[in-house]
Amino acid sequence: MITIKKMAEMLGTSTTTVSNVIHGKTGEVSPAMVEKVKRLIEEYDYVPNINARNLARNQSGIIGLAMRTNRDKYDNFMKDPFAGELTGAVESFVRARGYFTMVYISDDVTEIINSVASWNVDGLILLGMQRADGILLKQKVKKPMVFIDCYFDDSIFEYVNVGVDDQRGGYEITEYLIRKGHQKIAFLADNCVGVDYQRFKGYKAAIMEAGLPYEEEDFIMLEPNGSDMSLLLADVYRRAGDFTAFVCASDYYAANIMNYLQDHGLKIPEDLSVVGFDDNVYSRMVRPALTTVHQDVTRKGGLAVEKLFHMIRKEDYGDKFEQLPVSLVERNSVKEIR
């Protein structure tokens, strides 16, 4: 493949001039020379050597996007609309800055650390990490990093996180159900840490504020088994008669639960009201359309990328813990009880 040096020799000009044309910096290059360089590029199908350029800058030009997932919940994490939208947003914002994104998904944080270390990334965006994972990452990976949707309470290390006001969202969706007359409301999630715990805290705050009783049985712990949700959904169906409304920690579960309950004879919202959290494609495809909490996943990914590049350039990146607002989206999955 032809090099910049060879092109410069062929044209009787400097390598700097050829390089400037290749990278669009033509302000100080004559129009005639610009055309000559462009014709030579086309004739020899010249492709810039990005690796060489990044090595000269002591950079890899790569941003790592590492996601820790629960294999009991997902056989393929990218099937989840949240994961797909977030990954697409991060890749788009990273590419706009002339960098590349490398994605690694695992339920083993050690695998994640070994992989990102071998890439020699310039920075990391991390999703699904717990406190112990964050500590290990900070110890082993000496690169700028931004976490997404992570809550490391009383952490022994400083970290940068981009998320949404999960607790507020859990409160608002529950308070909405209470205003609609519901008094026996369950919260459904597959864990009680991180994001789901914050949403649960909001749910419980609304219950307590309204003076409604709360029992441990009102938290229905979902136990996924990969793509087979039959046992999980059968258990939810068995509990449905104890409540007038379900607050699901995600649209993913809300949609699956609604479909199963209706397939087994229950009417939504006549027999049971169901709400979710995320406002993704599931909420609009399921019938009746799902009342849920909206979060801007694309903005979340974009803000994480923005902060990371400020960190890479040693610039001010703003707040360490950024919470984007949420909003209630009212559709047709809630019945008003009079």
Image (cartoon, rainbow, N blue to C red):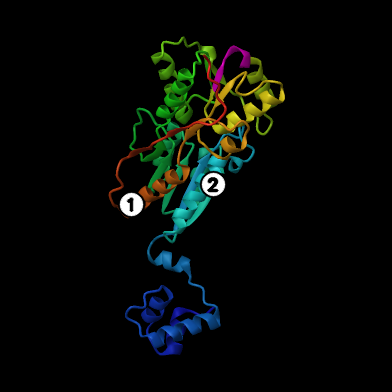
- Decide which of tag 1 and tag 2 comes sooner along the chain: 2
Quarter of the image with the N terminus in it? bottom right
Residue type, label 2 = Tyr
- Residue under pointer 1: 310
Q: Is residue 66 left or right of residue 258?
A: left
> Nearest the camera: 265 or 219?
265
Alpha-carbon distance for marks 1 and 2?
A: 23 Å
- Of the pair 48 and 250, the residue shown nearer to us: 250
**Which image quadrant for residue 98?**
bottom left
Rendered image: mark on residue 104: 2
Is 95 situated above or below 207?
below
Q: Residue at 54%, 83% (x, y): give it.
A: 43
Seen at 45% across and 29% down, the residue is 194
Residue 289 horizontal/vertical position (percent) = 58, 33
The correct choice, above or below, for 21 with respect to 226 in the image is: below
Q: Is residue 243 magenta?
A: yes
Q: Nearer the viewer, residue 55 or 47?
A: 47
Residue at screen point 49% across, 19% down: 180
Q: Secondary structure at mark 2?
A: strand
- Does residue 335 belong to the magenta stretch? no
**Residue numbers of the magenta segment:** 240-246
Amino acid at circle 1: His
